[in-house]
Image: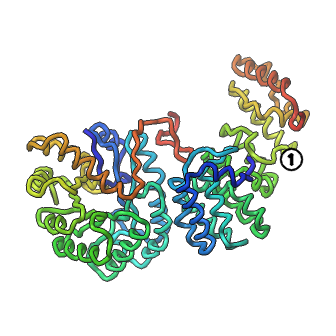
Amino acid sequence: MRIFDPHIHMTSRTTDDYEAMYAAGVRAVVEPSFWLGQPRTSVDSFTDYFDALLGWEPYRAAQFGIQHRCTVALNPKEANDPRCTGVLDVLPRYLAKDRVVAVGEIGYDSMTPEEDEALARQLQLAVEHDLPVLVHTPHRDKAVGTRRTLDVVRESGIPPERVLVDHLNELTVAMVADSGCWMGFSIYPDTKMSEDRMVRILQEHGTERKLVNSAADWGRSDPLKTRKTANAMLAAGFDDDTVDQVMWRNPVAFYGQSGRLDLEDIKADDTALFEGNSIKRGGE
Amino acid sequence: MDPHIPPTALDRQLTAEAQRWLTDAVARVGQDPAAVRSVFPAVARRCGRGPLVAGWTVADAARARLLAALPLRGAALAEEITALHRYGDAAEQRAVLRSLALLEDADTSFGALGLPLVTAALRGNDTDLIEAALGPYAARHLDYDGYRHAVLKCVFCGIPLDRIAGLAERADRELARMLADFAHERVAAGRAVPADVWPVLRAHPGTLEASGLPAETGSPVPDRREAAVRALAAYSATAPAGAA
């Protein structure tokens, strides 16, 4: 089984996770830039983070046979901090990078005027840089937030097939399906969305334009939720080809719209270096 | 590493589509220097990553052409290319470093303003960037001490000294002393000495003898003794730097 996790924050994960993911079939990931759990206070913190998403992290992933791509953006939460809005000015440099396959995560957190401004500007940047976008939907007041997100996407003029709306659930899937956007589902331990609920959504709404991710990060989360959902699909009677569609071909088709996905079969190589440094500890 | 790649060498390697993209990108950068910030990172996927000539890749040469098209001079030029380097990945940084001599040739007011990029590369561990930094621009602008330490870094990192610019003119007695001490350290560890230090030592007679390396032939430790014998044989078999 081959798995493409279209949303996972590997910067927060360990080498054990990479090993377990590879063993579970994960061969490619997209890491969206997002909030780090506490506020950043300057644009430079963001650019160092973007540099890591484009440099050190893909190097680490490659050591375990996993291809790493990323999306960059000013996230909605920090779009509210005037110390961080300068990120929007430096973004064009990053949106031109080979490993950037979308603008994201953008969207709403608390639906403030500042978030409106950042969302609109970044949808415009996506059009200018010919990139798809990954849109986060708010955890609070999700249905209203999702509807408003779809309105802003429509007004921006970006084609809906270039938009992935993420963190959906039973109450938001239908409106996104109707919009023509792609639908993302984050499978978490305990909360938000489980493997079995995901299977029911796929049974009810079909597998077209659906993506499943672990959204694993620094919080309680599980980087193997993609594989566990695939197992639940098989147990519910989906065939191998349909599992492959959801777990591999759909994310490849969505991010492939960047023209930069360019996945190749990589082999784990523990002799390679990044900027002359390696993941080995001294003495090895 | 000659930075003067003939334009035809690059053009021959570009597909018609890449050629069109680069021509358009050069025109855009010529009209609006800020456009370089989005086209410079995109060069490799648009033009190709393959080798060109003299250690340059197609992407290096295409990026050098974009930098040459910037309608900026002096401090403004330095500021723009410094930001490209700051936000660049290793391949972009390498292209900036390789372009420094060309930029100065076209604009004397650029002068030594690119030197901080060279010294940043020399502080790092990426041998590709260290090599790219040590072109003719570094040979012109590094002070003697900086240049000597750069050569020593190459020897430590295994970068062949024939890939760096200016060694024939800038190798002095103090550099020979440093390399002799390095050779002695290697021998004392029972290890081999990179062959490209010997021509510099031969050009400065007495430096090897002063290092204490020859005395290692009398070491009670067999590894050290044997390493010393091999080192002295290699030294004797080497013609001095500068000799034909």
Say if B229 sits above or below A245 in the image: above
Q: Nearer the viewer, residue A35 or B207?
A: A35
* Residue drawn at (23%, 44%) of the image: A244
Q: Nearer the viewer, residue A56 or A279?
A: A56
Q: Please, what is the three-letter code of the amino acid marked with disc 1?
A: Glu
Say if A212 sits above or below B37 in the image: above
Q: Nearer the viewer, residue B57 or B194?
A: B57
Say if A274 sits above or below B65 in the image: above
Q: Nearer the viewer, residue A53 or A254?
A: A254
* Residue drawn at (30%, 40%) of the image: A20
In the visual, does A125 lie left or right of B93? Answer: left
Kindly give the residue lying farthest to the bottom in the view shown: A113
Q: Which residue is mark 1?
A: B169
Would residue B89 be visible to someone looking at this image?
A: no
User: How far from the left and from the top, in percent, is residue A178?
Assistant: 16, 67
User: How far from the left and from the top, in percent, is residue A211?
Assistant: 23, 54
